Amino acid sequence: MKQSQRIVKNALFGAAAAAVGGAIHLATILLIAKKVPVAQFGKYSWVLAFAMFFQFLADSGLSRILVREVATQKEQQARIVGAAVALIWILSISIGLVILALLPFLPFGFEVKVAAGLMGLSALSQFHASGYGAVLRAHEDNELTQMGYVLHKVVLFGVVFVSLHRSNVLVGIAVAHVAAVWALWAFYYFIVTRFYLRVHLVADRELWKKLLVTALPMGGGVMLRQLALQADVLVLKSLADFNAVGLFSGPYRIGMALRQLPETLALPLFPLYSRLALESREKLGEVYRQSMKYFSLLSFPFGVFLVAWSDAVIRYAMDPKYSAAVPAMQLLGAGMVPFFASTLFPYLFAAVDEQRRFLVSTAICGALRLALDAALIPPFGFLGPCIAFLVTEFLLVGVWIVQLSRLGLRFSLADALWRPAVASVAMAALVFAVKPLSLPWQLAGGVASVVVYLGVLWLVGTFARDEIATAREGIAFVRPLLAHWSNTLRKKT
């Protein structure tokens, strides 16, 4: 299969999984938001943020670096994967003991403590699942990765639905997270051991040291990055109450659900980035510029819809009790443009082995975000973290672009953004024009605005001839994909 066909295949499967799985995930969040009081939804968000911190702490970038190592050293994958899985067990058990030690000291009731413990178990189990998922991503068989992603969201929705009709709702939701991750872990384990390699734990201290030394700067940057995304909830709770956390978390969780689309599309690019970083920086620069271009094109329509239809999103998707959160939804919508693009940079820095640059820049912007949270929450309440998010996302992406430029990977932000910016203005004009009309007319106008957006992009020459030719070549991936899996299944039977 040609590289262009792998990219298109992975992008299409990623987009389909993001659409299906993202919709199910969003439905799960909205179901919880509708069925529980705002303060209870705030507790759920706090528990989730608490668990996610320990997941990032345990992972330390290991699963991401594992993708790079396997993608560039497939002949050594048995040893690398065996050592990585053993290291994952050591790290997850260690962090699990830390969580158990902290639970009695949490300043909340018994129900919140139990939910936090279960959510911690879910987060550490996700670490194991990510280790096996890294093997699939390294081999660029992302159709299997996305099947697991959708499976996770289906199980989560099903168990949450049952839990909402029972007592101890918060604990039930935490149990749902555990069940969904265990299903994902089992699926990835079966696929990897059935089609790729038998995983045997390897106690290799030198390899553990190499993996950790390589992964820690990246893991630190990713942890700080994700911590910044979760810290808003923690800081907001310390300066306000669970009601404010709930009002912020409703729009914020919608934004996090939408983030699954660029994250799903970025993951398949990492093996390609890693190989090109060893083969040719010039080719890596070309792929980087194209990636940024198309992620920017994708982000603008989401930003337009969230800003223009924020009140409708809150009213129809969530509940009138969240109506005060409309301004938060608008601010978060404006941040979708840098938010989408930001998903590419951890993989780019890891591919060129410049994880420390990523760590330092992320730490500085993360500290700025926390400072803005502390300064803005007292006067603006739950809108403070939204403003901090908007400012720091634009700043951080700008810093990363400058850093990569100094490494020889140049990118013109103005050249990439002016076309989608012009097209989004035309799109927004139509969306706002139909906004006073009835819901059917608004939906029709929304569909028409996407057509307008694509039409303007075409008129201003956004798509080059070689890009169109590559896309046409890539679309012909179906026959090679069927041949690949037909041969694979034949060998395994």
Image (cartoon, rainbow, N blue to C red):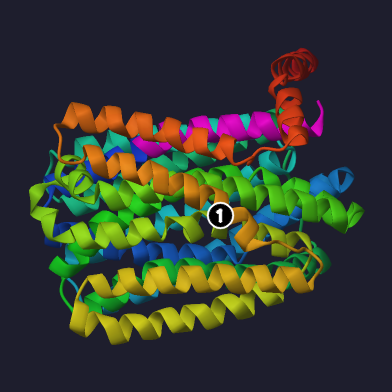
Position of residue 334 in the picture relative to residue 416 (left or right)? left
Q: Quadrant of the C terminus?
A: top right
Q: Is residue 445 visible?
A: yes
Is 120 situated above or below 72? below
Residue at figure coordinates x 46%, y 38% from the top left: 453
> In the picture, residue 137 is in which quadrant?
top right
Residue at figure coordinates x 41%, y 66% from the top left: 229
> In the picture, residue 230 is in which quadrant?
bottom left
- Classify mark 1: residues with Cα within 10 Å, few (<14), some (14-19) or many (20+): few
Residue 458 lies within the magenta run: no
Is 54 situated above or below 280? below
Position of residue 292 in the picture relative to residue 41 (left or right)? right
The amino acid type found where label 1 is placed reads: Trp
Position of residue 154 in the picture relative to residue 421 (left or right)? left
Percent coordinates x, y for residue 395 in the rendering = 52, 74
Secondary structure that dominates the magenta span: helix
> In the picture, residue 11 is in which quadrant?
top right
Is 103 situated above or below 17? below
Percent coordinates x, y for residue 263 in the rendering = 54, 49
Residue 22 lies within the magenta run: yes
Residue at figure coordinates x 69%, y 46% from the top left: 269
Position of residue 20 in the picture relative to residue 485 (left or right)? left
Residue furthest front in the image: 459
**Pointer 1 residue:** 418
Q: Nearer the viewer, residue 145 or 320?
A: 320
Q: Nearer the viewer, residue 108 or 303?
A: 303
Helix, strand or loop status at disc 1: helix
Q: Is residue 144 visible?
A: no
Residue extent of the magenta highlight: 1-23
Percent coordinates x, y for residue 435 in the rendering = 20, 41
Percent coordinates x, y for residue 479 in the rendering = 74, 14
Q: Nearer the viewer, residue 11 or 398?
A: 398
